[in-house]
Image (spheres, rainbow, N blue to C red):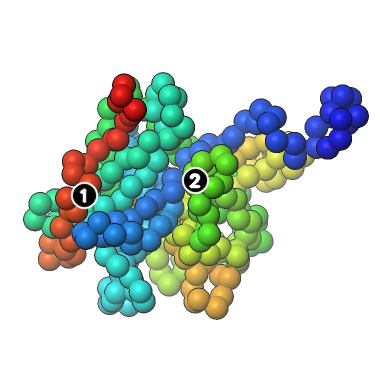
Amino acid sequence: MDEETLDRGLDDGLSPGRERFMDVPELASLHLELVSSGGKRAGHATGFVMRDKTGQPYLITNRHVFTARNSKDDDKVRSGGIAPSVVVLPIMPADHRSPWVPLVCRLGDDDGRPLWREHPTYGKRFDVVALPLDLDESRIDLVTMPRVAPLAYLDLTSELFVVGFPIGFDPVLSGAGPVGVWARGTIAWRPTWDWEGLPSFLLDCRARPGQSGSPVVFQADEFTSFRGADGTIKKGPAWEFVGVYSGRTHEHSDIGIVWKRAAVIELIDQGVQPTVDDYWVPEFPAVFHPAGLQLPTDDT
């Protein structure tokens, strides 16, 4: 944009330095770093926080992110998978004295029992888990995905967005920190039908590794009209949480699986903690002891 254009007060939406309001989905999406028991990086993925009906916050992501196992293939270890024992995620401090600070979360207790919750009916076949977060929220600005009634009526070819962190995304080099990337997709399987008998549907989207665990949202701008869940025609701006993305049906396909919102909420409200017999979490690495929020001190 040249100086003459700037002087006329025009804004094409591309100029750096202009104040922009960021929607909840891109702020709620969290860049997850997985760490092995030896303190080595085991990969990265996406997650977000939702609350149960009592207000308790949970970190939501895919089960295969925490286990490196494919629950649809007799829980076999995924190709190249390294089982993590820690997840590190960025949190905004309440005073905003630094953009984000790391929150270190253990995935298992001292006996190796998983700390996350799994779906009360589908168990490990439901590739979404909820890890309870023990936080002093007076010290942080925790952005959570809201629990609201359905807004839009969704059907075949409805447009949705996967908001997460695809492979190649570096939050340090991004210039804006760990803010989610929006990937567009369309519903590719009639959403009233449960894919493989589980509460999920298919999305045609060029998502990539790293976006596992991303929230999937419906988004309509101020120029877009859409059919509401109540049958009336509505106009944007509007958005809503629809489900959780968990990867493609095949490595050579762009068809991915989305776990439905209602089942995710059931998981959060009624989830069951697995036993050591269900899955054993590797030892917590000493390099990250103690776990918790790593807020800066007055000396830093």
Query: Which residue ends up furthest to the left in the rendered image?
Result: 111
Q: Where's the C terminus, which quadrant?
A: top left
Quarter of the image holding residue 50? top left
Crowd band around label 1 with a 10 angstrom C-alpha radius: few (<14), some (14–19), many (20+)? few
Compared to 294, does 157 lie above or below?
below
Please state which of residues 46 and 173 is positioned toward the viewer in this rendering: 173
Q: Where's the N terminus, which quadrant?
A: top right
Query: Which residue ends up furthest to the front in the rendered image?
Result: 299
Quarter of the image holding residue 68? bottom left
Give the residue at x 18% y 44%: 289
Q: Is residue 26 visible?
A: no
Residue 259: percent from the left, percent from the top?
A: 44, 58
Residue named by callout 2: 172
Callout 2 secondary element: loop
Residue 113: percent from the left, percent from the top?
A: 14, 56
Crowd band around label 2 with a 10 angstrom C-alpha radius: few (<14), some (14–19), many (20+)? few
Residue 287 marker: 1
Residue 125: percent from the left, percent from the top?
A: 32, 66
Q: Can residue 89 be seen in this view?
A: yes
Amino acid type, label 2: Val
Residue 62: percent from the left, percent from the top?
A: 37, 58
Give the residue at x 70% y 45%: 226
Please state which of residues 223 and 108 is positioned toward the viewer in this rendering: 108
Q: Which of marks 1 and 2 is nearer the N terminus?
A: 2
